[in-house]
Image (tube, grey):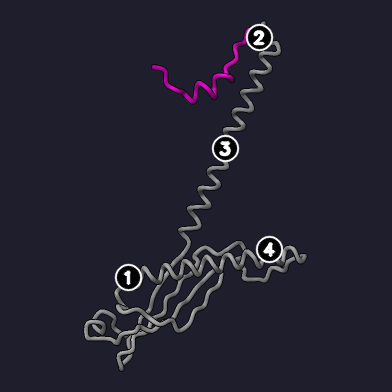
Amino acid sequence: MSRFSLSRHVWAPCQIQSNRQQASFAAKYQRYRCHTGLITLLLGMVTLSGCTSHHLQSHASLRDSISTNIQHNGLKLFRYKLTRVTPEANTSGAYVRPRNNKEAKQLAKYKQIGRDNMEAQAELGLANTMAKLQYCRDGYIELSRLIETDRAEIRGECKEGANAEDRRRFPTF
């Protein structure tokens, strides 16, 4: 049974004997194949590693929190916050002024994509958090929403009032 060996196919062209008769065109072609194969392999590895690291970084950079507030009359309020832990390239907070109209449109497009992404992440995070906590059992009414490229905040009011169990599980300080 013959098995495919990567080392045999990649490195075999690089193993050139030092025979004086092989210093012809065939030897030069074999060296060329060796170098192009190695360069292609290295470029492929660099490309794949770049995609992988970007993918992993983008999913691990969000942090969420929720604060609950049960008022004396039984009204149940909450505030859900989502923030990006690793900020974008512009960490100073300074405004980046586009040089021309094309750059301005492109910057606006990227900001809108960032806001849309943050909004989708906030909605998904809030739904998962509410399902896990069982804070608003009958649903909630959204009071306000703030969405930016690096943070999101959703405030809401539960449709049902607080009972004794809610007051015990979610104390207000």
Q: Measured along the vertical axis of the image, is residue 147 above or below residue 31?
A: below
Residue furthest to the bottom in view is: 73
Instruction: Determine crowd level at label 2: few under 14, some 14-19, many 20+ residues with C-alpha closer than 10 A.
Output: few
- Which residue is the site of mark 3? 44
The alpha-carbon separation of the residues under discs 1 and 2 comes to: 73 Å
Q: Are marks 3 and 4 in contact (CB under 8 Å)?
A: no
Residue furthest to the left in view is: 164
Report the disc number at residue 106: 4
Q: Amino acid at mark 1?
A: Ala
Report the disc number at residue 131: 1
Please tell me which of labels 3 and 1 falls first in the chain: 3
The alpha-carbon separation of the residues under discs 3 and 1 comes to: 43 Å
Q: Secondary structure at mark 4?
A: helix
Q: Position of residue 148 (x, y in %)?
A: 55, 72
The alpha-carbon separation of the residues under discs 3 and 2 comes to: 31 Å
Q: Which residues are magenta?
A: 1-19
- Which residue is the site of mark 2? 22
Indicate left or right for 43 with 139 as reference.
right
